[in-house]
Amino acid sequence: MVKNKKSFFVGSPYYIWMIIFIVVPMLMVAYYSFTDIDGNFTLENIKNLSEYADTFVLSIFLGAVATLICLIIAYPLAFMISRSKASTQKMMIMLVMLPMWMNLLLRTYSWMTIIEDTGIINSLLSKIGIGPFHMINTAGAVVLGMVYNFLPYMILPLYSAMTKIDKNVLEAAEDLGANMFQRVFKVIFPLSVPGVVSGITMVFVPSVSTFYISQKLGGTGYTLIGDVIDTQFLNSGRNMGATLSLVLMVLILLCMLLMNQFASNEEEAMLV
């Protein structure tokens, strides 16, 4: 009993922080979702969600595309880093984290100057008689911004999982006659599933809920659900904005539960 009291006392700052900055905001979102501007209970906000169905679909689609591209890029890169010398690993991880030291707004603005119609790329292409190409305010520009800003969140958990893979396991698989593809799909990938799940979650969640990247690189033609929520709150539509936030939160939680279930199934299969 005394030990439990000590543990509760030591963890009390965390509990207080969690209540103030997690539980209370979620309760406020739920309250505004089911009330009108006068504070009366209503289901009108829920009924009006159908108006934003296309926006939800577009947000999930672009977020999934960005997450898949991040996984394709990050997986071989993380494996290469994990198999390098210790000094090389430190340097490569520092290079991966270096862009994160700069504010997301500045990183997004830099891509605006690079891919706009009179930007750096088109200026260089025009000098050799190619282009200009319209790259900004497109779906590709939005995905590019997501990939650039969130790629480190895919690399780091993959790297963390792959550094735990014993080199002797890979050598044993090679000695048993496994070729490169068999080693990747039957040894490396199953052992790195926790990193894959963490990386997908850490990239997909901010990609679906982003609003600044889509505003600056996608323009008005590619409005994501984060943009709609931002607009609702700026225009005193906090009740509808809270409802959209609540639905987005539920969708994200469902995706996280699905990914965790997938990871659990993979771990059970490995044990069998």
Image: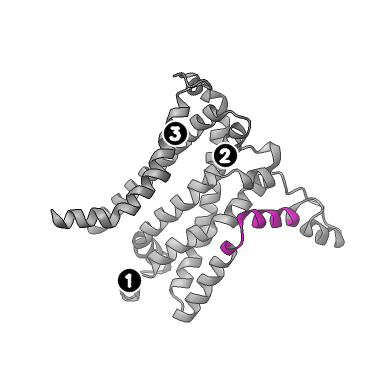
In this picture, is 112 found above or below 156? Answer: above
Is label 3 or label 1 in front? 3
Query: Disc 3 on helix, strand or loop?
Result: helix
Q: Check disc 3 and give the amino acid type.
A: Met
Query: Residue 212, image x and y in percent?
Result: 63, 46
Is 103 contained in the magenta span? yes
The residue lying toward the viewer, choosing from 211 and 77, is: 211
Residue under numbered circle 1: 173
**Of labels 2 and 3, the one closer to you:** 3
* Disc 1, SS: helix
Q: Residues within 10 Å of mark 2 (few under 14, many from 20)?
A: many
Q: Is residue 197 above or below residue 47?
A: below
Q: Residue at x 32, y 46 (%)?
A: 261
Q: Quick check: 270 left or right of 25?
A: left
Circle 1: is it few (<14), some (14-19), or many (20+) Cα within 10 Å? some
Amino acid marked by disc 1:
Ala
Along the horizontal axis of the image, is 127 left or right of 54?
Answer: right
Residue where numbered disc 2 is placed: 226
Looking at the image, is mark 1 or mark 2 nearer the viewer?
A: 2
Tell me where residue 269 appears, x and y as whole percent.
26, 54
Please report the bounds of the magenta region as a residue range: 100-114
- Chief secondary structure of the magenta portion: helix
Q: Amino acid at mark 2?
A: Gly
Q: Which mark is residue 28?
A: 3
Q: Are marks 1 and 2 in contact (CB under 8 Å)?
A: no
